[in-house]
Image: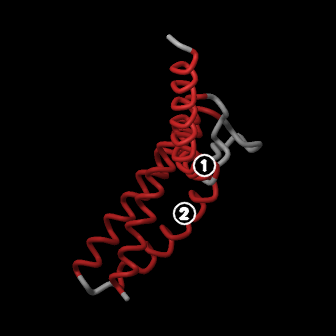
Amino acid sequence: MSDVTQAVMIALTAALLKNLASKLLPLVTDEFASIKGVKKDISYLQNIHGEIASRLSKVSDTELYGQLTKLVQDIDDLLREVHEEAKKNKKDSNGEHAISGGFSSTPKSLLFRCKVAHKIKAIKATFSAIVKHKR
């Protein structure tokens, strides 16, 4: 291979890698932010779960009632899953199982956080759609 051909291939590879990195960086950054914000998002879900559950009996629209019931169930399932993971990983000072503090920094835990972050994102999107439709 001639020096010119090799230089062209190196330049093309460098340009391709730069382009790929510029597209991947925002995705990785968003994913990391989602994973990092899991504890805060769990707290948020616990709050909206309580709000929805306390007002559910007052909802007269059957379609809205069904959507909110499903949302509460999805939040329950997610919180139960997080609680179970917390029981596996960590106990707080009272010997009780901590929900948001139960994450460790192992690769398995990071994968779990990523999975939870995606579920939280879906729940938040559903909640936003319900609120938007209600307005």
The label number, if any, that marks residue 46 in the structure image = 2
Q: Amino acid at mark 2?
A: Gln
State whether residue 101 is above or below residue 126.
above
Crowding around mark 2 (Cα neighbors within 10 Å: few <14, some 14 to 19, many 20+) is some
Quadrant of the snapshot with the C terminus: bottom left
State whether residue 27 is above or below residue 128.
above
Percent across and percent down for residue 60 are: 27, 87
Q: Is residue 98 left or right of residue 64?
A: right
Percent across and percent down for residue 56 are: 37, 77
Q: Residue at x 67, y 45 (%)?
A: 101
Of 13 and 119, nearer the camera is: 13
Q: Who comes first in sequence, dot 1 or dot 2?
A: 1
Q: Amino acid at mark 1?
A: Thr
Of 95 and 127, nearer the camera is: 127
Residue at disc 2, secondary structure: helix
Circles 1 and 2, Cβ within 8 Å, touching? The answer is no
Crowding around mark 1 (Cα neighbors within 10 Å: few <14, some 14 to 19, many 20+) is few
Q: Residue at x 37, y 67 (%)?
A: 126
**C-alpha gap between disc 1 and disc 2:** 26 Å
Can you name the residue that lies furthest to the right here? 93
Locate residue 57: give its quadrant: bottom left
Q: Residue at x 62, y 54 (%)?
A: 37
Please give the residue where the numbered disc 1 appears in the rendered image: 29
The label number, if any, that marks residue 61 in the structure image = none
Can you name the residue that lies furthest to the left here? 62
Q: Is residue 38 left or right of residue 52?
A: right
Percent across and percent down for residue 59 are: 33, 84
